[in-house]
Image: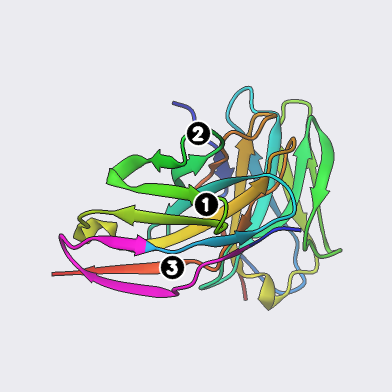
Amino acid sequence: AAGVIQSPRHLIKEKRETATLKCYPIPRHDTVYWYQQGPGQDPQFLISFYEKMQSDKGSIPDRFSAQQFSDYHSELNMSSLELGDSALYFCASSIRQNYGYTFGSGTRLTVV
Amino acid sequence: AQSVTQLDSQVPVFEEAPVELRCNYSSSVSVYLFWYVQYPNQGLQLLLKYLSGSTLVKGINGFEAEFNKSQTSFHLRKPSVHISDTAEYFCAVSHTGTASKLTFGTGTRLQVTL
């Protein structure tokens, strides 16, 4: 079965650089969520999109932005990267009634 | 707002012993409840979920959980654990509305030893 695809799997950036993370949801899933998981931490909700519109916003820094495109894939753009942005970034997708979220394998971002 | 409390940060257990990982939630509205497992350096895998109906939910890998509305709990259990169950386990809750985000607990590290 198709799963949630995230790219890249690993990313190393320097401070103050920008990064773009991509998420391809399961076909026919119309909702995408982004989570950030710091080392030894639980996943923290960043932002979500339903039918290409932002549906909810969590603890996402102003330096980050995201969008969902017409093909339902989503991108998380991160600018002016800081050391504290080093984390595992997960994307999850679901259908409208959120009967189950499927997570991607994550993108491990390391800021040096 | 909703929140999840996982009462134990670490649970050590011997192989073939039973285990219970505790989870309590707080919410002013109806919720769905989930348990996820995360193996080292891997993503989150859904173990089981409670949406409605029977309060006893069976999941993958022999795990089950019971929804107790009066105690606002959703404890995860397994009658006999294996070394391969060693992982981080997260309890999570979402509202029953459309496109509702997950709120996670802080996780419980299950360490299974011989």
Amino acid type assigned to the residue bearing label 3 in the image: Thr
Amino acid type assigned to the residue bearing label 2 in the image: Gly
Nearer the camera: disc 1 or disc 3: 3
Residue B68 to residue A39: above or below: above
Quadrant of the image containing the N terminus of chain B: bottom right
Same chain, marks 3 and 2?
no
Q: Which of marks 1 and 2 is nearer the N terminus?
A: 2
Secondary structure beneath dot 2 equals loop
Chain bearing mark 2:
A
Q: In this view, does B60 lie to the left or right of A72?
A: left
Label annotation for residue A9: 1
Q: Is residue B10 left or right of residue A104?
A: left
Residue at x-position 34% and y-position 72%? B11
Asked if the stretch drawn in magenta spans residue B15, the answer is: yes
Q: Of A83 and A90, which appears nearest the observer? A: A90
- Indicate the quadrant where residue A24 lies: top right
Residue under numbered circle 3? B108
Secondary structure beneath dot 1 equals loop
Query: Counting other residues with Cα less than 10 Å from the Cα at mark 3, is it few (<14), some (14-19), or many (20 or more)?
Result: many
Q: Position of residue B106 (x, y in %)?
A: 54, 68
- Indicate the quadrant where residue A107 lies: bottom right
- Indicate the quadrant where residue B18 lies: bottom left
In the image, the segment drawn in magenta is B4-20
Quadrant of the image containing the C terminus of chain B: bottom left
Note whether residue A76 is visible. yes
Q: Are marks 3 and 2 in contact (CB under 8 Å)?
A: no
Residue under numbered circle 2? A3
Chain bearing mark 3:
B
Q: Position of residue B36 (x, y in %)?
A: 46, 51
Q: Estimate the spatial distance between the alpha carbons at disc 3 and disc 2, rounded to whole Å.
A: 26 Å
